[in-house]
Image (spheres, rainbow, N blue to C red):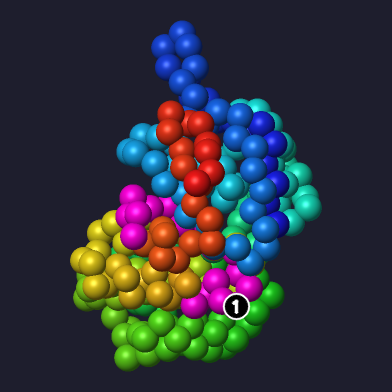
Amino acid sequence: MIESQELSKAYPKGSHQAFALRRATFTIRRGEFVAIMGPSGSGKSTLLYVLGCLVRPTGGVYRLEGREVSHLAEQELAHVRGQRIGFVFQSFHLLPSLSALRNVELPSLYSKQSRRERRERAQRLLGRVGLGERLDYRPTELSGGEAQRVAIARALMNDPTLILADEPTGNLDSATGHAIIDLLTELHGESRTVILVTHNVEIARHSADRILYIRDGVLAEE
């Protein structure tokens, strides 16, 4: 599913470069649930964004489903993101002016699906995450847990094989957070690959098949 060889990411810092990720080499198999842990500023989110084709690596090779994607043109990267990857973020990133239903539909607006097909799929996904009665609610009318469920439904809209979750429970209380992790675990059970960035050791050990640790941009395995 994922092959990384000597993957690095550096940012300019004055006259020097600051490395957020240093020569990471690892493999993640299809259908695996992998947690990434490390202190704040260690490079966890940078690694996730590189894997999600949101950030280009400075060096190294990244293969997704056998395809080397590190140097694809921006339009090709957008296609990979749209068709292969579902994103779930800590702060939800829902558009406040749109209903839950319209937010979930967004990833498929430029697909070949008809408007009716998009609407019906979005309704089914919201029903699946327990929000069948909240279709017309806007993000400001939802609780944090409900907003994150909308974000998960949106991530599933194009039926991705890879789900990347960056601290999805960070803004939620403990009970709601565990419910969100249970939902991600259920999706993993459908042969999806899930990569979760978390500070929570209990969540990582309970849900993940494997834990990767990162500190100062250097990756190690439990």
Let me know if residue 200 is in the magenta part: yes
Total numbered labels: 1
Q: Is residue 98 above or below residue 132?
A: above
Question: Is residue 214 left or right of 189 when viewed as pictured?
Answer: left
Percent coordinates x, y for residue 10 in the rendering = 52, 25
- The residue positioned 46% from the left and 21% from the top of the image is 18
Most extreme residue toward the top, as rendered?
15
What segment is highlighted magenta in the picture?
A: 186-202
Tell me the amino acid under the disc marked 1: Glu
Asked where in the image residue 174 lies, by quadrant, the reply is bottom left
Percent coordinates x, y for residue 42 in the rendering = 40, 35
**Of residues 65 and 99, the one drawn nearer to the viewer in this rendering:** 65
Percent coordinates x, y for residue 104 in the rendering = 46, 74
Q: Which residue is under mark 1?
A: 190
Question: Is residue 49 left or right of 98 when viewed as pictured?
Answer: right
Let me know if residue 7 is in the magenta part: no
Most extreme residue toward the front, as rendered?
222
- The residue positioned 61% from the left and 56% from the top of the image is 81
Q: Is residue 101 above or below residue 79?
A: below
**Of residues 111 and 47, the one drawn nearer to the viewer in this rendering:** 47
Q: Is residue 188 above or below residue 82?
A: below
- The residue positioned 33% from the left and 75% from the top of the image is 179
Percent coordinates x, y for residue 67 in the rendering = 77, 50
Helix, strand or loop at mark 1:
loop
**Of residues 119 and 207, the one drawn nearer to the viewer in this rendering:** 207
Q: Residues within 10 Å of mark 1 (few under 14, many from 20)?
A: few
Q: Is residue 76 above or below residue 216?
A: below
- The residue positioned 34% from the left and 60% from the top of the image is 202
Question: Is residue 115 left or right of 176 when viewed as pictured?
Answer: right
